[in-house]
Image: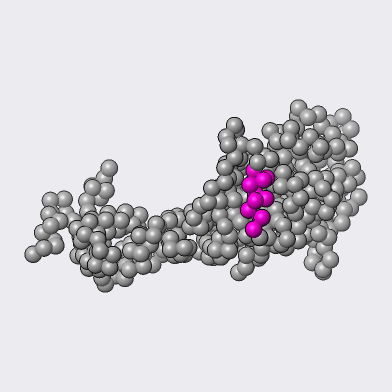
Amino acid sequence: MSDEHQRVLDPTSAPRRASEVHTVELDGEAVLLDERANELHVLNHTATLLWQLYDGVITLDELASEIADSIGLDPGIARADILEATGQMARSGLVEQCRWLDEFEELDEKVDP
Amino acid sequence: MEGPARRAASYAFRLRSNDAALVEWFDHLVASLPLVTDDRVPAEWTVTCSDDADAPEWTIEVDGEEYITSSRRDDLLSSMLTKLNALVVDYWSGAVCHAGSVARDGLAVLLPADPGSGKTTLTCGLVRAGFEYVTDEGVAFVPGTTRIEPYPKPLSLDRGSWPLFPELEPNPPFLTPDDERLQWQVAPNDIRPDAASGPCDARFVVFPRYVEGADTLLTPMSRAEALIELAKNTFCFNEQSRERLDQLAEVVRACECHRLVVGDLGDAVTRVEELFADE
């Protein structure tokens, strides 16, 4: 496993959908076509919701707070889930503008000053 | 001898040959393909049989370009049908899915699957049970719609399916012993008269998979999953991937989608009939 697979995203990243990715939505699930490689991906309902919110402006922390508030989820759990899901999409090249934390950087230090 | 000009989806063609028996049998097989009635110029398929009576060879040319030479007529027929499939895909402007399909009352069920999954066997069983035959190989969608242009080619039945359809054993005038044949080419009208469907609309997508000895089981699947699978079973998907994906998404939106494990042909036919019961 490469380092990238072990690292986590910087929660202050503001991801955006890659411009080469074409989206089709069916019953709340997104099917993504990465036109660079003609690869298809399917997102579940939760990941599809995230996908719709990646606008290159809102940060992952802000997304986590927003989603936690809206569905009454523990903010820490929401944040961890969002970082993991977004990390998978970033590794697949589906989202851009993501920054990975350095190997020894403490995630907690990025969040609560 | 010359056969009539026929249309396979949007591809028009006509067969000429110095082998009259071959032309007659080929036209029997493709009789469900409509005759060309407009002013399009059909491609010329020419099959020439060599003069060597002891070891004859047949060579086919398509519009003057040599395609293949064979020492057996039934092999040649299989090659001709393979070529026809490829040309149907090349000439059709919309998406063409690798799938069998049958219809009832203008509504079609698609049966997309990899080779060897049993899609032709299931298609044949459904036609025998009274469904109209759309195709056993290429479902051609009219661009921008869920409409299907039928391609009622001969059904290519593999050896493993022959015991299920003993009544369909072909009897061409140049029969080769069974132990040398790989496929039966079956004319749709030999399954039952007027078997071919007209244009129809996609209503169900069912992904069949033959599993020897398994219980036959129909299970629903999400449209997103179905779209991915349908895209994988679409000819030349990568050449126009975005347009194809959008078209297939429209198809899937109009359909119920299922997986079908086929352990028994009769049970599988019943499961598909049950899908249509509420229509």
Q: From the viewer's perspective, is A65 left or right of A50?
A: left
Q: Which residue occupies the foreground of this view, A15 or B269?
A: B269
Q: Which residues are magenta?
A: B268-278
Q: Is residue B277 magenta?
A: yes
Residue lying at 76% horizontally and 45% vertically, measured from the top left:
B128
Image location (x, y in percent) of residue B264: 65, 37
Q: Residue B251: x and y, percent? A: 58, 62
| Residue B40 visible in rendering | yes
Q: Residue furthest front?
A: B278
Decide if residue B248 is in sight here. Answer: no
Where in the figure is residue A112, as x and y percent of width and height? 11, 63
State left or right for residue A77 relative to residue B168: left
The percent position of residue B174, horizontal first and vertical second, equals 86, 36
Relative side of A78 to B52, left or right = left
Quadrant of the image occupied by residue A2: top left
On screen, B78 above or below B106? Answer: above
Q: Is residue B9 magenta?
A: no
